[in-house]
Amino acid sequence: MKHIVVLTGAGISAESGLKTFRDSDGLWEGYNIEDVATPQAWRRNPELVQDFYNMRRKAVLEAVPNAAHFALARLETKYKVTIITQNIDDLHERAGSSNVMHLHGIITRSQSSLNPNLTYPIEGWELKMGEKCKLGSQLRAHVVWFGENVPMIEPAARLCAQADIFILVGTSLAVYPAAGLVDYVPSETPKYVIDPKIPEVTIQNVIRVEEKASTGVVSAVNELLLSAK
């Protein structure tokens, strides 16, 4: 069974109503990234950061997967599929994908402020100040902030190197180190690039699908299912 590796970014969740991480004005939901998505911001004003992610979590829980999420889940009927996502939502899982790697964490879990490997599920949408991990430190969103290590990047690179087919959807390839993952995909591997505005890529064997995710992913998946052996 061929192994399809999919790398998804904010564009796939935008059609479910979730704002892209960094809009053209450099803001995320009206906030400067530096005020809500860095360790320094957490030290300066943990209440603001906690409230910000509570609102993002509420939005994620109210959102529903779209046609692109469901189409990727259908690939599992004929292929081994691994989804590597830059997104912190759980829409891939809710659409039925069974093998999802979150590069930047997942907002429906919390983590210790002392040990990022110590994580907990969050009941509902609100994580309160005063809720602590077993080490006694304040719990925060299980999200990788700017200036923090991306611990899943090396396992993700190994997966990309094993891809028989690669799909890139909904990402501008602007955020590193995630953007560098395409360089690990073997040159001979077919690479579907799906986006309304396809970023400049210097990789070989590219199949360009210049459409929004909900239509472009569905057409690519239908093609792959028909050609599966």
Image (tube, rainbow, N blue to C red):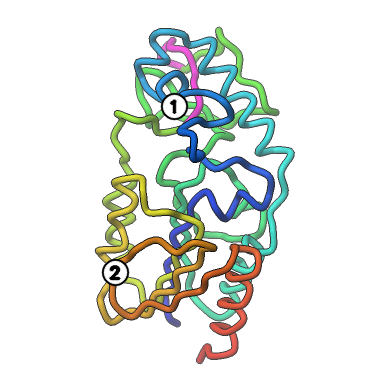
Q: Residue at x 33, y 63 (%)?
A: 159
Q: Residue at x 48, y 52 (%)?
A: 9
| Secondary structure found at label 2 | loop
| Secondary structure found at label 1 | helix
Please tell me which residue lies in front, 50 or 113.
50
Residue 200 in the magenta stretch? The answer is no
Q: Which residue is mark 1?
A: 33
Q: Residue at x 61, y 14 (%)?
A: 128
The percent position of residue 172, horizontal first and vertical second, equals 42, 54
Q: Which residues are magenta?
A: 134-142
Q: Which residue is mark 2?
A: 185
The percent position of residue 93, horizontal first and vertical second, equals 61, 53
Corner quadrant of residue 6 = bottom left
Label 2 amino acid?
A: Val
Pair 1/2: label in front: 1
Taking 127 as reference, is 82 left or right? left
Please tell me which residue lies in front, 193 or 62.
193
